Amino acid sequence: MREQIAFFVSIFPALWEGLIVSLKLSAGALILGFTIGLPMALARTYGKGIVKKIAIAYIETIRGTPMVVQLFIIYFGLPDLGILIDRIPAAIIALGINSSAYQAEYFRGAIQSIDSGQMMAAEALGMTKKQAVRHIILPQALRIVLPPWSNEVIYMVKYTSVAFLIAVPELMARGKMIISWTFKPLEVLFWVGVIYVIVLSIIAKIVDLVELKISIPGFQMSREDHY
Amino acid sequence: MVEPILRIENLYKNFGDVEVLKGVSLTVEEGEVVVIIGPSGTGKSTLLRCINYLTVPDSGDIYFEGRKIEYKQDNLSIVRQKIGMVFQEFNLFNHLTALQNVAIGPSKVKKINKTKALELAEKELLRVGLQDKADHYPAELSGGQKQRVAIARALAMDPKILLFDEPTSALDPELTGEVLMVMKDLALDGMTMMVVSHEMGFAREVSDKIIFLEGGVVSEMGSPEKIFNNPDKERTLEFVSKITRLGPIDSSRGGSDI
Ligand SMILES: Nc1ncnc2c1ncn2[C@@H]1O[C@H](COP(=O)(O)OP(=O)(O)OP(=O)(O)O)[C@@H](O)[C@H]1O
Ligand SMILES: [Mg+2]
């Protein structure tokens, strides 16, 4: 056991650097995914004609192809078109685009779960559709979406490990590197796993706190037990 | 003659194959309380929603304050600001407190300054007797309180006419009285109101005119005395006595409570 701990201490600095890269990738991808995903959800829900069609095509194409393919297209494919992107931005873009399609569907689900009377009442007051979406629908939808959205955060932290395929030095890639100089795959992977578990439970806790903070009496089903 | 505040001419509305409104015409004078009755599915809600174009009619004209509403050209937001609406299911904004529910219209639609909007909202809550519930969320209010907040929300826009779509039919019987009381006060204050309701006590006591809507048209229209006592059509009498019989609690309580 002592040895194990000593071993962990010796590899920790390298793993820590990897973890930081993983978290940066996750944060970047989640933000990008949100920035693209929310408009896509709105376009798919409220858009008409071509706008709606584009949103559906985008979402379904992204969801219908493996993430690795998307990553390789961006990192290995785009240079053929003269677009060169560094490893880390390439990984963030690929993960972010992938996430945007899933986030869009979470948002859309949340928007559709809101009673149609809310929009009607907002329009009856004289709000335009845009105002109603902004002031009435989204504040509710974003609260409803938080529990499924937090799953996306968890998935994302795990999915960043695919970035090691394009040699981004994230947690998994660091682990693989360490294995190659220590020849201790089992131990290294064990500690990589431990780090993932700890980080993910910290994130889950933070999400819980945020959820509690923005919750409204009787509004969020998931939080009803607090009242 | 003064121009009626609302004039509906020959309104038609289909949903697919279902013809709902088949040429509805009616007028509402300023200060008048008009109660609309009629069987379920006959288009009462559709009629109300056509007035502020939440549902777009297929044909027919609506004149509001003497001006024809032009769906294509008019800024519907401005028309809707002057036409308040109260729904059967309240439709309070779930993420806002009672006070915020009332303030949001003035603040976001009329763009009046937030402090002023909140002050105004307080005044409107006072008017419906709910100043002490200002900080409660909809889920923390009873049905009757929710509906009174919804009325305050509509009032905060300073509407010229209020449309009520069965405002008490989602309420437990013991809660309808408080809502009807608020509505009666509004009527006494001179508010123009168009009320879809089968609260016969309210209709008898407060309304100036009762409209019997059936089969997509105004089947009969007249003063409460006439509609209750000697309507032109036998069918009207039959319907009125049916709903009065079906809602004995409503009609007796509606009459004595308010
Ligand atoms: N958006 C819609 N799409 C399709 N059909 C509709 C729509 N709204 C109403 N209808 C239909 O139009 C008819 C009239 O509905 P409406 O709600 O106006 O009746 P109502 O008189 O208010 O009935 P109730 O007393 O049950 O409230 C019904 O047959 C209803 O199913
Ligand atoms: Mg109805």
Image (spheres, helix red, strand yellow):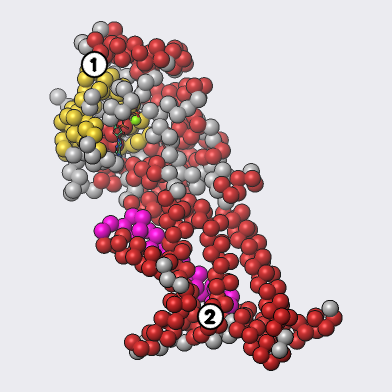
Q: Give me the C-alpha separation between circle 1 and circle 2.
A: 76 Å
Residues at marks 1 and 2, common chain?
no
- Residue A151 in picture, x, y percent from top left: 56, 62
Please state the chain letter of the residue tagged with numbered disc 1 in the rendered image.
Answer: B
Q: Tell me, yes or no, if residue B238 can be seen here.
A: yes
At a point 62% along the width and 58% down the height, the residue shown is A208
User: Which one is in front, B189 or A180?
Assistant: A180
Q: Tell me, yes or no, if residue A195 can be seen here.
A: no
Q: Quadrant of the C terminus of chain B?
A: top left
Q: Nearer the viewer, mark 1 or mark 2?
A: 2
Please state the chain letter of the residue tagged with numbered disc 2 in the rendered image.
Answer: A
Q: Secondary structure at mark 1?
A: strand
Residue range highlighted in magenta: A22-49
User: Which one is in front, A23 or B165?
Assistant: A23
Which dot marks residue A163? 2
Q: Residue B13 sits in which quadrant?
A: top left
For ligand 1, give the image quadrant. top left
At a point 45% along the width and 40% down the height, the residue shown is B92
Residue occupied by mark 1: B222
Q: Quadrant of the N terminus of chain B?
A: top left
